[in-house]
Image: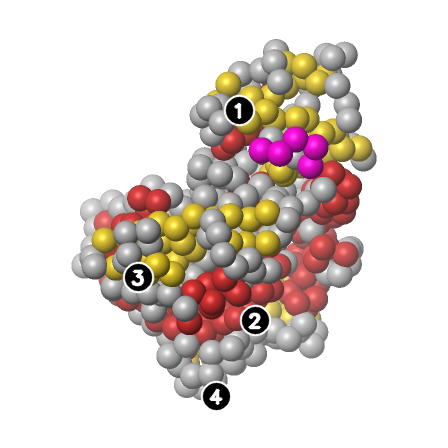
Amino acid sequence: MNDVHFNSTVHRDDMLIYQAGIQSTELCSKVKTISFQTPTVSASLKKLATFLEIDPKRQTWDIWFHPGISGIEAEQLLIERGFDGSFLVRPSRSTHGDFTLSVRRGNKVTHIKIQNTGEYYALYGGEKFASLSELVQFYMENKEQLREKNGDMIILKYPLNAVDPTAERWFHGYISGREAEQILMEQGRNGSFLVRESQSTPGDYALSVRQDNQVTHVMIRCKDNRYDVGGGDEFSSLKDLVEHYRRSPMVETSGSVVHLKHPLNTTKINPTSIDGRVKKLQEGKDQTSGFWEEFEQLQQQECTHMFSRNEGQRPENRMKNRYKNILPFDHTRIILRGGDPSKIGSDYINANLIEVLPEFEIFDGITRKYISTQGCLNNTIDDFWQMVWQEHSRIIVMTTKEIERGKIQTKCVRYWPEEGQSWNTGFNKEICLSLLIERMTPDFAIRTLRLQKIVNDEAESRLVYHYQFLAWPDHGVPPNPGTVVNFLEEINQLESGMTDKRPLIVHCSAGIGRTGTFIAIDLILCNENLRHYHPMGKRFLTTS
């Protein structure tokens, strides 16, 4: 060990996208470090973001605490799954009650002892903290405080996600006792229960049960990968423990019987536990369980918005929205310029600018921006091309067919001319739009369009490239994720040769489900760290 000293509207298609989003999260589990200030992650993807507990300011040990692993296993995890700056915390094998901070630095791993006195946590000789979480947060935020004896800094950048101890839906991860009580009182009934991680003792768990309109908390100890409630039988898994006490209720010292009748399920899980949760959800046999059950629960939740959407709700703009409840946020919407200032709503289009926020260091250097928008309506085609010209966008990504499900659903009206033809569009029809070339592949179409406009008495001409993904089936999701990756790789190859990088315009029908999915995957493809870090990278992200 290195020596260290010291100086954080419901549609079936929506449900399928929700299910696909969960199932494809293995491909983009690191998307939890992205923040989209746009409704693109409302509806289907916003529900998925909520499901993944996206919160850039919260660093908790349900993310980086790995119970029951050795130093050798920690090194293997960090080398195989991590990269420079990745870290985890684990119980100390040499001193019971203490912990070890393991940090990857290049191709080596440094192990640092964390002292637990019962009153505070500290790196030997360092600051004292009331909780393990506070200690880790401090050294993440104060990068110069953790050094080796030779003065080299040890930087904590990326928490290495731990796998949940169970895929059971009654496991709520890292929530406090007070949060558990609130959930059980608001959503449960007498006999409802959940299991959570202990905040007072890292590595242990707590069983919270509602009975007689109050909540009882029972500590579950975990030692040597065996679980018990402080005496009596030991179990090899949390599931076995819970199932035992569902059959044979435990009795409190007061004589009260604790009945575990109704599991209170959660839709929030650690992204590294996706596989187990998907298997559990797929056990649902009908539309009252599994994926359908979770999706319906989300639809019934009260819709709240952190940001205003007033412009989209104006009477003058309602006919420009494909869906009345899918609207752009006021502070990130694309504002059209050049319209009639006396006409209310002339600056409106249902579109938002998306960019990675600067606090996410893992995406340092990525300057790509996106515009997420809905599929064109007959009355928004001119506004769409006005936006393309105004924002100098050179690439349009269309992730849907114009009509799907046998002409039952119109996803987007055709907003480009036939090959060799042209028409006028934009405000006052000042833009001449021509389709020069159309190339078809089995999975997507590529169109080269020319936009011309008179600017300052001179004709200005631009080429715009239109990529349409055709391999998304009417029901379900693409059977081969490689088709999506190859599609985005071709777009990225074209964009890499452009000197003037402008926002990529991405749309499906509503501008939320497939649009958000494509943007999330594209951000991973743009990030070399994530391409080589994630296990899926070995399978799909090395096609270039």
Residue name at image x 52 percent, y 70 percent: 280
Q: CA distance from mark 1 to mark 2?
A: 41 Å
Q: Mark 3 sits on what residue?
A: 257
Amino acid type, callout 1? Thr
Amino acid type, callout 2? Lys
Residue name at image x 61 percent, y 44 percent: 66
- State whether residue 107 is above or below residue 387: above
Quadrant (top left/top right/bottom left/bottom right) for the N terminus:
top right
Q: Give residue 226's position: percent from left, percent from top.
A: 59, 54
Q: Mark 2 sits on what residue?
A: 279
Q: Does the stretch in magenta take in 96? A: yes
Total number of numbered discs in the rendering: 4
Helix or strand or loop: what does disc 1 sit on? Answer: loop
Q: Mark 4 sits on what residue?
A: 406
Q: Nearer the viewer, residue 526 or 316?
A: 526
Q: Nearer the viewer, mark 1 or mark 3?
A: 3
Q: Nearer the viewer, mark 4 or mark 1?
A: 1
Is mark 4 in CB contact (under 8 Å) with mark 3? no
First in sequence, mark 1 or 2: give its number: 1
First in sequence, mark 1 or 3: give its number: 1
**For residue 64, side relative to residue 378 (left or right):** right
Helix or strand or loop: what does disc 3 sit on? Answer: strand
Amino acid type, callout 4? Gly
Count residues near mark 4 (Cα–Cα under 10 Å), then give few for <14, some for 14-19, many for 20+.
few
First in sequence, mark 3 or 2: give its number: 3
Q: Which residues are magenta?
A: 93-97
Q: Give residue 533's position: percent from left, percent from top.
A: 71, 47
Q: Nearer the viewer, residue 522 or 438?
A: 522
Q: Mark 1 sits on what residue?
A: 117
Q: Nearer the viewer, mark 4 or mark 2?
A: 2
Q: Nearer the viewer, residue 228 or 533?
A: 228
Q: Does the magenta stretch mainly form a helix, a strand or a loop?
A: loop
